[in-house]
Structures are given as structure tokens and as C-alpha cells.
Amino acid sequence: MSMHEHPTAKYPVAQRVHTQVLEWADELAAYLGRPADEISSRGLSASDFPNGHQLVITLMDGSTARFRHAFYLIRESEQALAVFTEHCGYHIFPLHDAQIARRIEQSLYPPSARD
């Protein structure tokens, strides 16, 4: 089933998600190590998204956004920062003065059985 035939494709957010995949297919291909045409037709899968950390974006005015199961791509030519999340969509932010941090998630309490 192509993304165009996906049942949620009639909803605006799902349409925008698909558009972002198409617009960033070349960068996604380079990052994920898969062909751009495959990514364009099949989209992203759960295995494309990292676990165990938060991606924290701080924008030029100090606004921040935090995402789990996410990765970012930069398009310098457009001064664009794209954030791709597994569950919360794909987002484009201005790159100007943006800061990107990856914070490791570690459960501190309750202690795990390994501690």
C-alpha cells in the first residue's frame, strides 16, 4: 500500500507528513542509507527512529521543543532544520541560531533489577 492509499492520508496532518517525506527524501536517504525512491513510496518505519534519548531543539528566541524517538536533518541551502519523530509528526524549524542537543534518557528511580 502506498502512502497515498494509506487510510489516514485524508487527514491534513498525515498529508503534511507525507509531503515532508517527499521534500526531504534525498536527505533522508543519505541519513538512513536507503534509496530516496523507496523512502518516497514507503515512508519511514519505526526502526528508523532512535531510542533512549531526547532531541532538544532551542530556537533563536529561546523557545524549546523536546522530542523522543526523533532525529534531525539540516538543509543549509534553505537554513532549515527538519525534525522527524516516530509518533509526533515531522517539523521544520528555522536553522538560524538554533541549538540541537541530544539528552540521554536514564531511569533513576525506581532502580532497575540490574542496579
Image (spheres, rainbow, N blue to C red):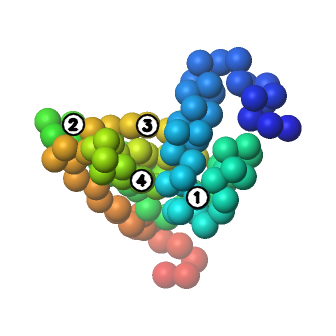
Name the N-terminal-most of marks 1 and 2. Answer: 1
Give the answer, above or below, for where 108 lies relative to 2.
Answer: below
Residue 93's x, y, as percent?
Answer: 32, 38
Query: Marks 3 and 1, how far apart in space?
Result: 18 Å
Of callouts 3 and 1, the N-terminal one: 1
Provide residue 98's location: percent of width, then percent of height.
22, 47
Q: Which residue is mark 4?
A: 73
**Amino acid under label 1?**
Ala
Q: For the point 50% across and 54% down, which residue is it?
A: 27
Residue 105, how many percent across, how many down? 42, 63
Ranked by sequence position, the earlier of labels 2 and 4 is 2
Q: Secondary structure at mark 3?
A: strand
> Distance between the Cα atoms at labels 2 and 4?
19 Å
Mark 1, Cα crowd under 10 Å, few <14 / some 14-19 / many 20+, is some
Q: Which mark is residue 91?
A: 3
Q: CA distance from mark 4 to mark 1?
A: 11 Å
What kind of element bears circle 2?
Answer: loop
- The correct choice, above or below, for 31 with respect to 75 in the image is below
Residues 9 and 35: in front is 35
- SS category of the residue bearing label 1: helix
